[in-house]
Amino acid sequence: MLTKVAVALVVIAFAFLIGMYYLPLLQQNERMRSDILRLQTQLQIEETKSRDLQAQIDALRNDPGAIERMAREKLGYARPGETIIHFVPATNSPTEQ
């Protein structure tokens, strides 16, 4: 009976040592998996940005209207005889009454 208990304790101690050995590896594996997930999400965001920029490049290369829109929006250009009206964004400060 005592021998069975001793063998069981040795097996439990051995299993505990193996668990202690592999615990850092399991934690590292979990960190790496979370890093992979974060990087995959970031990659998807960057690929979406890349597609949007490529679409803008294609529009500017092939669509004269896109060039005109950009010149009007970014540079404030207008055709002769046009009047440009700029709206000032509203401030969120409370007014006194």
Image: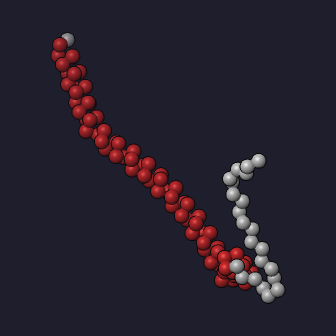
Residue drawn at (60%, 69%) of the image: 51
Residue toward you, 92 or 33: 92
Visible residue check, residue 66:
no
Give the left or right position of residue 31, taking residue 75 as reference: left
- Looking at this view, is 91 or 81 the one in front? 91
- Give percent across and percent down for residue 94: 70, 50
**Residue visible at 42% across and 49% down?**
33
Among the 4 quarters of the image, the one containing residue 53: bottom right
Q: Compared with residue 24, is residue 41 higher up or lower down, i.e. above or below?
A: below
Number of on-image labels? 0
Residue pictured at 26% horizontal, 30% vertical: 16
Q: Nearer the viewer, residue 35 or 82?
A: 82
**Residue 72 seen by the camera:** yes
Above or below residue 39? Residue 69 is: below
How are the colours assigned in the image? Answer: secondary structure
Q: Residue furthest front?
A: 97
Residue located 46% across and 56% down the image: 39
Where 7 sits versus 60, above or below? above
Q: Dividing the image into 4 quarters, which one contains the N terminus?
A: top left
